């Protein structure tokens, strides 16, 4: 959908400012994923399908929807990628609107996980949508004063599942409703709008509320919603009309019901999403009981205590100038906590208890700056140069994620630093507005049909790289090109430029290619050729010397590296070979890279029988079975929405993958880059995924304990190689049982590097969104967005627990309230009860010492803090220990105990100088020592970062005590 075109609905629903009340004809109601337009039988509102509005994603039928409302029978799901997907709505600038998005997912299918993703309104983060209840309709509402003549509502940044939406609605508000002193800088996000005393669980909306606000019933029962109700709370109602002629105009039907504290107290407690925060709070009160002559209703707010408000006495009838008339005390800027406890208490001279009809709480959300207007104007102009090949990205060009052909700065407001529109069939002239993009560093417009002269770019002082080759550009080269202070490379070959080349471009200070422009010529300076000849000669000599040195140095390093690899038994080698100059100049075509075997798309279609046999689906695309002409079986992975990767990123990934060679990593055989598709071809793994064998059908090959240990060892070696054998190191980022594949000999290989990232020198990664799979995701990485190798270690610890138990990483059926395998296993292992987590099919077939060794290292892997987790090398050694124990190569149980590696983080020194094992080591040894009638006393052991405990966790028999004096182990 085009951000720069008017919203399709505008011709249907003309947004004309009403004179007094909101007109229903101005409502915009979109059924996302719906198949046709219709009129809702409950509200009489007209709904339209988004099929002609949103071209991305796919409509999905909701499994077991809650109720029969037409707009919740289907939803629209969006791809899981780095892009955002937006609806653009036309607005009237500076008019106030209520914007509402709703989400009902329905029942899960095929082991899927509930989605968690973010929604944005323009560049401002609106909410994180976290689905946990299949039947609940999640509602997000924002009240805005429109900043321009359109707004964008975007879904993006999924951490689990895929983003989706059920409905999107726009409701104009009347006159000064919801006006604040802060609306130039803040939106109002609705946190709660509650109808007290409601007759049913149904929300009140249009036509009862002419502005179609959702007034949620206080009868709804869910966790931490309107709990802590005071004894004596009763529900009352009336059929009399209520005077509501005040600022916010709550509906009469809402004001006709209320709750009353008959014992003098009215109290509730609820959680407020995205709090603590500064908020705008309204209480809606109307006296709807006929009070006697000597009766009064007076009360104060006891909680939360606020000096300016809590001492005020509320007398509804007096404040509202009569009964059955609205009184709405408001708090325009008050700080509220996440858990809101509020209570009203009657005064001593009151005969009736406190009363409450409705309440509304909204928090202030600071409006984030959009991309610089001048930069947005340029990309808007570019979007019109090719309606066919340049994808119409919606929303803000840079926030929350940049359009796939842009890169942006982190400053505010964001500025565009790179435009990459290579080979996009652009036509017409380069927009003259380009001169205003002062922060632009790279401009890639090669391989198009652009015409006309170059626009003024003299203001682009940060411009470094310009690709204009293979177009139809004409005219002279501006003289300022030679004096742009940051320019490093200019490519203009195969155009129709004419005239003299500016001398600054021929100085040798930058890369300049102008072949294929017969109308261009050099200046007539007398000694120019001589100077250029000498310069080229000197440069050639220096280059030859330099490259000879590089080759010699490279060969020496390669020999040393190969020796080390041979010693480790690793086949092949990996280097950090950079992309060639050809890739830089051509923008990412791999044909001449020599890094992997290029396979034509036609050949892949033949091998896969036109992609007919789908064998799996990963994070970035579907995988198909194929058989090449030479009989080699392959797995062909078609990248989902290849445009989001970009050619250069695809080049980088293929160059990386093709240089990784290890027996425990799935090798990349070839690739294809045709027809805007990015395809990777891997070795076919005959026995599928580890997940299939642990959690799949009974027909899958049964894995005994020794087979599981070998698989764990193989996978750990593969990950260890990624962490330590590659320079720079690689973090997999999505380790799970479905990414561990088994070959024809049941040996394991780690697969799917779609989420891998090259490690920085400081081994630290910062990203805006934590990515991975729920249940395997490192909680430390999720909390602080800092990615390290220890994030892979955590995920691998979950895999080990799955191998031990045969259970899934996340399952409410298996773990109940614990919800995930880590919490469930930790609670049992801390009790020394490893047998309760053992896969039932292994009971009686496994040596307990071997099982304990794996449980021990698994618990270390899933430590809360990454610094306390082992390295992959240590995990490999631990698994090898378990294999030796299981094979019976250890002599005795006592020897096994004594050969357990004592790590300083697992040793505690008591006051008398005795060394004690703590944590999982103590638990692993407990069962063994009890057999020798040793005295065991166990106490919880705090995290090592909190310091040493004062008393030992376990007191061993004297035979196992280690006297170390008064020193501590570090």
Image: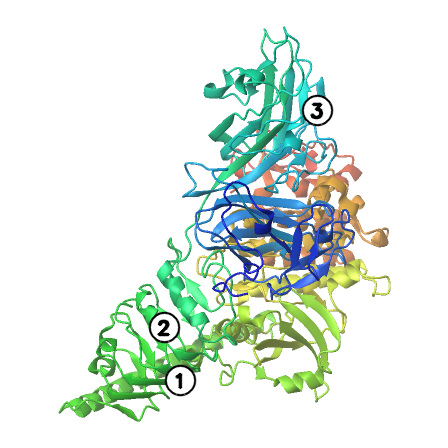
Give above or below for 772 relative to 645: above
Say left or right for 576 vs 49.
left
Q: Residues within 10 Å of mark 2 (few under 14, many from 20)?
A: some
| Residue under the image location 72 percent in, 23 percent down | 235
- Tell me where residue 450 appears, x and y as whole percent: 40, 81
Disc with the residue nearer the chain's start (2 vs 1) = 2
The residue indicated by pointer 2 is 431
The residue indicated by pointer 1 is 471
Q: What element carries label 2?
A: loop
Q: Is mark 3 on a helix, strand or loop?
A: loop
The residue indicated by pointer 3 is 238
- Tell me where residue 917 appears, x and y as whole percent: 64, 39
- Tell me where residue 479 appears, x and y as whole percent: 22, 79
Q: Is mark 1 on a helix, strand or loop?
A: loop
The front one of 417 and 256 is 256
Disc 3 to disc 1, how far (Cα)? 76 Å
Q: In which quarter of the image is residue 802?
A: bottom right
The front one of 6 and 26 is 26
- Name the residue furthest front: 19
The front one of 556 and 665 is 665
Disc 3 to disc 2, how far (Cα)? 65 Å
């Amino acid at each position: 959908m085009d951000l720069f075109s008017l919203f399709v609905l505008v011709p249907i629903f003309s947004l004309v400012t009403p004179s007094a009340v909101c007109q229903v004809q101005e409502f915009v109601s979109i059924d996302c994923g719906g198949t046709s337009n219709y009129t809702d039988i409950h509200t009489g509102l007209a709904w339209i399908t988004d099929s002609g509005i949103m071209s991305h994603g796919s409509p999905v039928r909701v499994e077991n929807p809650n109720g029969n409302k037409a707009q919740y029978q289907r939803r629209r799901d969006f791809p899981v990628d780095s892009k955002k997907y937006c609806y653009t709505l036309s607005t009237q600038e500076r008019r106030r609107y209520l914007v509402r998005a709703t989400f009902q997912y329905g029942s899960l299918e095929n082991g899927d996980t509930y989605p968690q993703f973010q929604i944005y309104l323009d560049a401002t983060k609106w909410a994180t949508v976290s689905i946990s209840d299949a039947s609940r309709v999640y509602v997000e509402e924002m009240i805005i004063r429109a900043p321009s003549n359109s707004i964008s509502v975007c879904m993006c940044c999924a951490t689990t599942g895929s983003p989706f939406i059920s409905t999107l609605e726009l409701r104009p508000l009347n006159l000064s409703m919801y006006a604040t002193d802060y609306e130039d800088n803040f939106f109002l996000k609705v946190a709660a709008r509650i109808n007290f005393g409601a007759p049913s669980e149904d929300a009140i909306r249009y036509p009862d509320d002419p502005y179609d606000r959702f007034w949620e019933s206080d009868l709804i029962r869910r966790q931490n919603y309107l709990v802590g109700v005071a004894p004596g709370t009763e529900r009352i109602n009336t059929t009399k009309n209520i005077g509501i002629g005040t600022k916010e105009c709550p509906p009469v039907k809402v004001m006709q019901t209320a709750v009353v504290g008959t014992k003098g107290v009215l109290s509730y407690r609820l959680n407020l999403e995205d709090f603590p925060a500064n908020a705008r709070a309204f209480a809606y009160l109307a006296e709807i009981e006929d009070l006697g002559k000597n009766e009064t209703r007076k009360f104060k707010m006891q909680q939360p205590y606020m000096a300016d408000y809590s001492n005020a006495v509320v007398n509804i009838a007096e404040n509202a100038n009569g009964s059955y008339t609205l009184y709405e005390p408001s708090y325009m800027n008050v700080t509220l906590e996440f858990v809101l406890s509020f209570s009203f208490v009657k005064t001593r001279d009151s005969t009736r208890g406190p009363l409450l009809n409705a309440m509304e709480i909204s928090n202030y959300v600071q409006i984030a700056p959009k991309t610089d207007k001048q930069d947005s104007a340029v990309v808007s102009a570019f979007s019109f140069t090719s309606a066919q090949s340049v994808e119409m990205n919606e929303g803000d060009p840079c926030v929350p994620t940049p359009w796939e052909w842009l890169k942006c700065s982190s400053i505010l407001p964001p500025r565009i630093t790179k435009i990459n529109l290579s080979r996009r069939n652009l036509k017409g002239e380069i927009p003259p507005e380009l001169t205003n993009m002062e922060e632009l560093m790279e401009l890639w417009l090669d391989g198009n049909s652009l015409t006309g002269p170059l626009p003024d770019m003299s203001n682009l002082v940060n411009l470094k790289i310009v690709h204009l080759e293979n177009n139809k550009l004409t005219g002279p080269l501006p003289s300022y090109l030679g004096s742009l202070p940051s320019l490093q490379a200019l490519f203009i070959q195969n155009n129709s430029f004419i005239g003299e080349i500016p001398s600054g471009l021929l100085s040798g200070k930058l890369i300049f290619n102008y072949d294929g422009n017969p109308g261009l010529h050099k200046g007539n300076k007398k000694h120019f050729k001589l100077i250029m000849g000498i310069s080229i000669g000197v440069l050639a000599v220096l280059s030859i010397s330099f490259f000879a040195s590089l080759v010699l140095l490279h060969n020496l390093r390669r020999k040393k590296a190969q020796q080390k690899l041979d010693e480790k038994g690793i086949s092949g080698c990996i280097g950090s070979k950079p992309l060639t100059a050809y890739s830089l100049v051509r923008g990412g075509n791999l044909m001449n890279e020599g890094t992997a075997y290029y396979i034509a798309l036609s050949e892949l279609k033949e091998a896969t029988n036109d992609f007919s046999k789908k064998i799996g689906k990963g994070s970035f695309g579907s995988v198909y079975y194929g058989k090449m002409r030479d009989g080699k079986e392959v797995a062909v992975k078609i990248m989902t929405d290849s445009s989001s990767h970009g050619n250069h990123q695809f080049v980088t990934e293929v160059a990386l993958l093709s240089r990784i060679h290890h027996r425990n990593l799935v090798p990349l055989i070839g690739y294809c880059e045709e027809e805007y598709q990015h395809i990777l071809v891997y070795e076919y793994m005959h026995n599928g995924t580890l997940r299939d064998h642990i959690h799949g059908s009974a027909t899958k090959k049964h894995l005994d304990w020794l087979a599981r240990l070998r698989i764990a060892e193989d996978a750990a070696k593969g990950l260890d190689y990624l962490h330590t054998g590659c320079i720079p190191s690689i973090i997999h980022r999505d380790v799970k049982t479905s990414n561990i594949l088994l070959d024809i000999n049941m040996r394991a290989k780690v697969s799917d590097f779609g989420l891998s990232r090259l490690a920085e020198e400081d081994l630290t990664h910062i990203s805006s969104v934590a990515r991975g799979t729920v249940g395997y995701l490192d909680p430390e990485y999720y909390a602080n967005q800092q990615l390290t190798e220890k994030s892979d270690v955590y995920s691998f610890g979950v895999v080990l627990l799955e191998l031990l138990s045969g259970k899934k990483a996340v399952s409410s059926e298996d773990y109940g309230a614990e919800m995930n395998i880590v919490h469930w296993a930790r609670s049992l292992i801390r009790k020394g009860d490893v047998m309760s987590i053992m896969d039932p099919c292994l009971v009686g077939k496994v040596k307990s010492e071997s099982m304990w060794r794996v449980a021990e290292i698994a618990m270390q892997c899933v430590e809360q803090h990454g610094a306390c987790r082992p390295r992959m090398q240590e995990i490999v050694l631990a698994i090898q220990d378990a294999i030796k124990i299981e094979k019976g190569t250890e002599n005795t149980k006592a020897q096994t105990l004594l050969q357990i590696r004592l790590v300083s983080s697992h040793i505690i020194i008591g006051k008398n100088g005795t060394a004690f094992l703590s944590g999982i080591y103590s638990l692993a040894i407990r069962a063994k020592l009890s057999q020798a009638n040793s005295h065991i006393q166990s106490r919880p052991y705090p995290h090592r970062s909190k310091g040493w405990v004062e008393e030992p966790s376990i007191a061993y028999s004297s035979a196992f005590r280690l006297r170390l004096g008064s020193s501590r182990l570090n």
